[in-house]
Image (cartoon, helix red, strand yellow):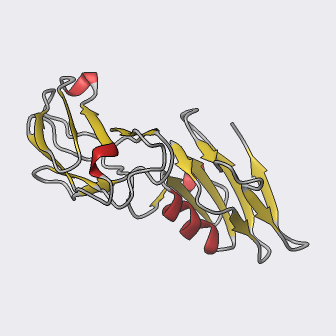
Amino acid sequence: VTYEDSYGDGWNDAVMVLRGPGASDWSGTLSDGATGTETACGFVRNTCVTIAVSVGMFPSEVSWMVEAAAADGGAGAQGVAGAEAEICTEGGPTPSPTTTLSPTATPVPTTECPYDACLEVVDESELTDALASGGSVEIDVTGPIALTAPLEIDGGATVVLKSSNGQGELDGGHQTQVLLVSGATTHVRVEG
């Protein structure tokens, strides 16, 4: 999914919703800036996905493009605020990965993780929820996350932030701080 805003201030309440059979609805928006991209997964191959974009406050600024992965046929569509479209995927009978941009945090099998919990995280709200859980946790950030406020880690937590696929990114925009770590027994390690 590629978002564009001609004024450069985000989509101003416009929201994109993707719907496909056998999958939960996926929604996304451009919170700030002129462009942004996200990956929406969890849709079943060999089906069609509908795309709807609401109008928001400044519809003339909003444009978008959605393109299926090459392994899913590479079909694409583009449009503006208020537009609807559909793309159909192709590929083998195996469904696409079930991780979406706004899922519940997915525990990693404990044999691969020496911490109390290991989570794969792909959006800001999920990352914030994972950090609030305290204890010892390893968090795999698997895509770019545009932060709207610094992430706060405290309460004696031990947190490992990593990116197993090399695509993890914490983007603080114009913020001067991305992580706020407090407490004498709080530990944070960043890998990858």
Q: Specify whether residue 6 is in view.
A: yes
Report the number of numbered marks.
0
Question: In the picture, residue 157 is in which quadrant?
Answer: bottom right
Residue at position x 78%, y 64% in the image:
180
Horizontal side, residue 182 vs residue 133: left or right? right
With respect to residue 151, does 34 lie above or below?
above
- Horizontal placement of 82 versus 103: left or right? left
For the N terminus, give its image quadrant. Answer: top left
Q: Residue at x 17, y 51 (%)?
A: 82
Foreground residue among 134 and 33: 33
Task: Indicate the quadrant containing the C terminus: top left, top right, bottom left or bottom right.
Answer: top right
> Image quarter for residue 61?
top left
Say if 181 sits above or below 120 in the image.
below
Residue 149 picture quarter: bottom right
The answer to whether one can see residue 41 in this image is no
The image shows residue 95, relative to residue 183, as above or below, that is above
Nearest the viewer among 179 and 133 is: 179
Left or right: residue 4 versus residue 189 is left
Residue 72, percent from left and from top: 21, 28
Q: Observer-nearest residue: 52 or 43?
A: 52
Residue at left 10%, top 39%?
86
Which residue appears farthest toward the bottom when viewing the image? 155
At a point 16% along the width and 43% down the height, the residue shown is: 44
Q: Is residue 29 left or right of residue 42?
A: right
Residue 16 % position (x, y): 26, 52
> Which residue is the extreme one toward the right?
184
Residue 116 appears at what percent x and percent y? 64, 66
- x%, y% of residue 70? 26, 21
